[in-house]
Image (cartoon, grey):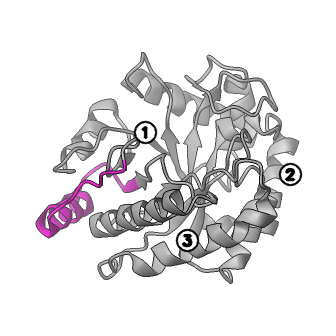
């Protein structure tokens, strides 16, 4: 198994590896700029190179993911917000490529009620501009933009896999696009994977619409919201409406269990703790046992 967590980044980046070690994870996710500010954090090339070298040589942390700032909205019809969003995504992707990250997780944004069909052109153009405009990745680095499924509130884009399929198709199946699946967002958008049959149906749909090869990681969270509640509210594992028994069929499924499972749980208010990582290890063990 590969249990990861969102950890603090910081200007020098390398300490985020040790922040992961402190809580016992084998993958980490970081913000490369403030998640709620437009001002980009600038990194000297030697800082990015130092991170690549440290990550490549690290004895326990195997994957790094970057999470794009929350302010990005590629579906926005507001020209100023849209251009700021494309610029922010381009910068986030440039930094992630320079770090040698395994992907940039992206909340696409919201069309604010205008409809997906009206917004998809802006979304696809923005993604293409970022993919083509970001700094080139060093040799051997594969750092796609990973579209994250949405919880479904407020006209969010990517609330189902049909929308994500359409976005990827609009970019002609660009190999630089991938997928991050969030367990709480699935639940909130009405996807019940709490049985072996439900999980099979979910993964079969992902494979048919997007391709499981594009699925690079999962965000592993319980939910404060009921099934179909359409709100993004994470809970610690076993403390929400999904529960250990509801999460186990998905995380134990052979097609998923070896992917990085990234905790984005609240912990005691400051993010994932070592105890949350231990809970995730137990959860995967429970899930794997369902298929043995």
Lower position in the chain sequence, tag 1 or tag 2: 1
Residue displayed at 56% across by 43% down: 219
Q: Does residue 158 sit above or below 191 in this rendering?
A: below
Q: Residues within 10 Å of mark 3 (few under 14, many from 20)?
A: many
From where the camera sits, is residue 264 visible? yes
Is residue 91 shown in magenta? no
- Give, as a single range, the part of the protein colored magenta: 38-65
In the picture shown, does residue 13 fall above or below 87? above
Quadrant in which residue 188 is drawn = top right
- Between 237 and 289, the one lying in front of the other is 237
Q: Give the crowd class for mark 1: few <14, some 14-19, many >=20 residues within 10 Å.
A: many
Kindly identify which residue carries mark 3: 127
Query: Which residue shows up at 22% across the image and 50% down it?
Result: 13
Tag 1–tag 2 contact (CB < 8 Å): no
Q: Residue shown at 55%/28% (left/top)?
A: 282
Query: Magenta segment: does it hold 57?
Result: yes
Nearest to viewer (mark 2 / mark 3): 3
Quarter placement of the C terminus: top right
Residue 87 % position (x, y)? 41, 65
Q: Residue at x 80, y 65 (%)?
A: 117
Q: Nearer the viewer, residue 115 or 124?
A: 115
Q: Is residue 159 left or right of residue 30?
A: right
Towards the viewer: 263 or 169:
169
User: Which one is in front, 249 or 152?
Assistant: 152
SS at mark 3 in the image: helix
Q: Which mark is residue 201?
A: 2
Q: CA distance from mark 3 to mark 1?
A: 26 Å
Residue carrying label 1: 5
Marks 3 and 1: CB-CB under 8 Å? no
């Amino acid at each position: 198994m590969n249990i990861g967590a969102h950890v603090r980044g910081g200007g020098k980046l390398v300490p985020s590896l040790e922040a992961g070690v402190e809580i016992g994870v084998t993958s980490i996710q970081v913000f490369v700029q403030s998640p709620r500010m437009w001002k980009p954090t600038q990194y000297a090339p030697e800082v990015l190179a130092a991170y690549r070298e440290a990550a490549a040589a690290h004895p326990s942390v195997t994957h790094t993911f970057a999470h794009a700032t929350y302010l990005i909205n590629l579906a926005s019809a507001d020209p100023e917000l849209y251009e700021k969003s494309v610029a922010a995504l381009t910068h986030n992707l440039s930094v992630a490529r320079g770090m040698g990250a395994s992907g940039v997780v992206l909340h696409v944004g919201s069309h604010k009620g205008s409809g997906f069909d009206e917004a998809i052109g802006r979304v696809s153009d923005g993604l293409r501009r970022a993919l083509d405009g970001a700094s080139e990745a060093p040799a051997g680095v594969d750092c796609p933009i990973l579209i994250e499924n949405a919880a479904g509130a407020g006209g969010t884009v990517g609330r189902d896999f049909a929308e994500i399929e359409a976005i990827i198709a609009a970019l002609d199946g660009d190999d630089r696009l991938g997928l991050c699946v969030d367990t709480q967002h699935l639940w909130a958008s009405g996807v019940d994977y709490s049985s072996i049959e439900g999980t099979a149906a979910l993964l079969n749909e992902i494979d048919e619409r997007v391709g499981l090869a594009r699925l690079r990681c999962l965000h592993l969270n319980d939910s404060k919201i009921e099934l179909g509640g359409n709100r993004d509210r994470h809970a610690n594992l076993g403390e929400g409406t999904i529960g250990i028994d509801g999460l186990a069929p998905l995380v134990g499924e052979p097609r998923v269990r070896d992917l990085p499972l990234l905790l984005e749980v609240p912990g005691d208010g400051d993010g994932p703790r070592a105890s949350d990582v231990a809970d995730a290890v137990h959860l995967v063990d429970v899930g794997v046992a369902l298929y043995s």
